[in-house]
Amino acid sequence: MAGLVLDGKAYAKELEAELSSRVQTLKEKTGDADPPILATILVGNDPASATYVRMKGNACRRVGMKSLSITLPEETTTQQLLSAIDELNANPRVRGILLQHPVPHQIDERACFDRIAIEKDVDGVTSHGFGRMAMGEPAYGSATPAGIMRLLRRYNIAPSGREAVVVGRSPILGKPMAMMLLGANATVTVCHSRTKNLAEVVRRAEILVGAVGKPEFIKADWIRDGAVIIDAGYHPGGIGDIELASAIDRCSAYTPVPGGVGPMTIATLIAQTVEAAEKATEIEQPLRPTR
């Protein structure tokens, strides 16, 4: 019997309905007809990145928010990008700032991420925000792992006491995912390119997160029976980082690809922008630790 489908697409729709109501309440309580703004910055002309930015803009409009899209040329320098971020930091109408990853090679991406004001870091990419999240302090978590945690809560899957394995250690996915699971009292192992006996480590996982960025890198026969499978990858042909088809009948729950983690990433970004707007206008929606 196939495992429970962790339907991120369906839950994202539920969450958007809630957010639409909160945006309307925000406008009514402030007497301000202008909705909160999520600013997106795209540097260069990568088609996939442009698609992601459009999807985020569409999600803003669905909940009644505004999207401010800034596109900069491929040859943009670090200083030029920093200046663009500074303008958005200073704009009181902008409640959240998203710098689309990746940026062209000549740009110091970390310096640009860290220039984003922490109160507008709704994508959870700053070092300051990561540090606060890792310490259990209020922060906007990196959107993809924070979306995964939302999805686990929605389906009443508690990480507490379970052994979790995260395959991947990127600063905006693998590392924050591990910290969030640890904050939820899981016992966490992070795997990477130098992990020895990877299959044996994966086989211990009660919760497995594929975040390595390689199509079907994690094989089905590595996965223990009854595991919760979270596939954060997406590659051409609609496949993820995990060889999922052969594991569905043995797992307890899984995220489909597509329709699992991806929709939750965007929904979480929008949710955190709404939270930032509520916090900025002193409406009682306190920022909560991401766990």
Image: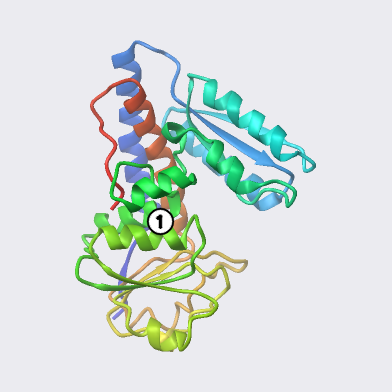
Instruction: Give the residue at x 59% y 48%.
Output: 110
Give the answer, above or below, for where 83 lies relative to 3.
above
Q: How many marks?
A: 1
**Label 1 sits on what residue type?**
Pro
How far across and down, in percent of the image, does residue 105 sit?
Answer: 73, 52
Q: Is residue 116 left or right of residue 128?
A: right
Q: Seen in the image, is 157 located left or right of residue 232? A: left
Instruction: Using the rendered view, name the quadrant where residue 76 is placed.
Output: top right
Q: Quadrant of residue 111?
A: top right
Q: How are the residues colored?
A: rainbow
Q: Is residue 112 left or right of residue 45?
A: left
Residue highlighted by disc 1: 145
Element at label 1: helix
Which of the 4 image quadrants contains residue 175?
A: bottom left
Label 1 Cα crowd, 10 Å radius (few <14 / some 14-19 / many 20+)? many
Image: 81 above or below 254: above
Image location (x, y in percent) of residue 261: 43, 58
Residue 117, horizontal then vertical, whole percent: 48, 32
Does residue 96 appear in the picture of this structure? yes
The residue depicted at 42 percent of the width and 66 percent of the height is 256
Look at the image and tell me in which quarter the N terminus lies: bottom left
Residue 182: image location, x then y, percent: 29, 62
